[in-house]
Amino acid sequence: MKGTVAFTSLGCDKNRVDSEVMLGILAQKGFQVIADEGQADIIVVNTCCFIKDALEESIETILEMAEYKKTGNCKGLIVAGCLGQRYEEDFFNELPEVDAIIGTAAYESVAEVASEILAGKTGERYLEDIDRPMEDANGKLRVLSTAPYFAYLKISEGCDNHCTYCVIPKLRGKHRSRALESLMDEAAVLAQNGVKELVVVAQDTSIYGRDLYGESKLHVLLEELAKINGIEWIRLLYCYPETLTQETIDVMAKNEKICHYIDMPIQHGNDAVLKRMGRKSSQALIKEKVAALRQAMPDIAIRTTLIVGFPGETEEEFQDLVSFVEEMKFDRLGVFSYSQEEGTPAGKMENQIEDELKEARRDTIMDIQKNIAAALCEKEVGKVVQVLVEGKLPEESVYCGRTRRDAPDIDGLVFLNAEEEIYSGDFVTVKIREAGDYDLMGDVIYADEPAE
């Protein structure tokens, strides 16, 4: 054994996949991965700095982990991901506690970096070309940090959209898809290891394959993934409305394994704001795409995200967004207050909105959405649905799980009563008897019971 390593992964589920790949590489190279930072020889923090809050959390976590150099066994602190990539010039001056930084395209070097630190080499930057093709082979080495019955499948890296508020293309590079064959191989390994639900992710999943095959092949990928034995649910996140194809919608509608669920970030509903954001959609286009999804799959759950308080957002533009949200009745919706990021065009725009007004606008939208969500939950009462069991509440004889309409970690839960013992990762049939604002309550129906 070369040493022990503890890992802290911050940010999005795409970052989580990168962390899982690094964990796999470290394990393969002879390091022992442990959970206790106080006992680890090396601590790795995979950072996020997409918005100000994420940046602050990353810095706080780095400083917290650095304390283990005094109180624990830590001999080296590695910072991976976006923070080091973004601020590599000034990094060691600002955070001398860090021994090495690994950029967003250099994850394959993590074991080498850890070995070099243990040998006394510190203060190094490991930064590769962020536009280089994705490494395919290492996906099979992943050590899952999720529950064993579901996993994220990262199908591409980078982004070509260059929205005016976003720094991701500068940190992650241009859009690069992984080869279809590589993704199939990885998904097959995940299924063999007990994964039942695949959550397909990328910065922009709807253009998967455009760089490799000349056109989007997301619909082909979904069809192929559905052929893998052991995979029961396939869930699709982060599709842009302007690039979501009818072929993908049709495949979702006809294939039983593909959940009638989509995360489609739209960011706003007013055309003028969308234009300032550098988005390629419009209110009419978004309505058209939502209508197409709902026509093909009347039971589909559509999740989206919005940004309020974008520079120059007038009261009239905000009210247009309010009306849009009330009309569209999205099944799931999250709202962010605009974060002014250095190095972005929006960060230099005039008429920046005060934080107090941004927060008030966010609260307004979320109050509207809470009522919409509660009404939609109420419509589920009496239905019989399939639920993936996630666990049992420690102090009650009540289980919790998710339906096809709920993504892990971000959506609601179903709380279950069951007469017999059930286990995490089981699929059960449930009759919904009660609804909350975002969650549902139900009872497991057994094979000899009528489903009514």
Image (spheres, grey):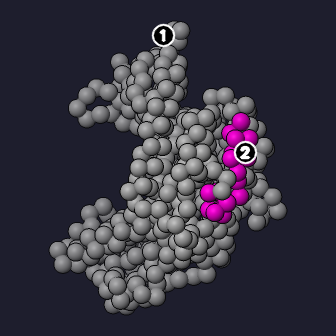
**Label 1 residue SS:** loop
Question: Label 2: few (<14), some or many (≥20) within 10 Å?
Answer: few
Cα separation, mark 2 vs mark 1, equals: 47 Å
Q: What are the residue bounds of the magenta stretch?
A: 273-291
Q: Is residue 287 magenta?
A: yes
Residue 2, horizontal then vertical, whole percent = 36, 77
Quarter holding the N terminus? bottom left
Amino acid residing under circle 1: Glu
| Residue type, label 2 | Ala
Task: Give the overall secondary structure of the magenta segment.
Answer: helix
Identify the residue under disc 2: 284
The residue nearer to you, when weighing 272 against 211, is: 272
Q: Position of residue 21 (x, y in %)?
A: 50, 65
Residue drawn 78% across the image and 43% down it: 246
Q: Is residue 443 above or below residue 65?
A: above
- Whether residue 144 appears in this view of the structure is no
State left or right for residue 281 relative to residue 8.
right
The residue at which mark 1 appears reads as: 449
- 385 in relation to 279, above or below: above
Give x and y (percent) for residue 275: 67, 60
User: Which of 28/111 is in front?
Assistant: 111
The residue at 48%/19% (across/down) is 381
Q: Give whichever of 264, 337 is nearer the camera.
A: 337
Name the quadrant containing residue 258.
top right
Q: Is residue 81 magenta?
A: no
Whether 236 is drawn above or below 181: the answer is above
Q: In what element is the residue under mark 2?
A: helix
Residue 60: x %, y % from top left: 30, 69
Task: Please identify, in this view, whether the residue under mark 2 or under mark 1 is nearer the observer.
Answer: 2
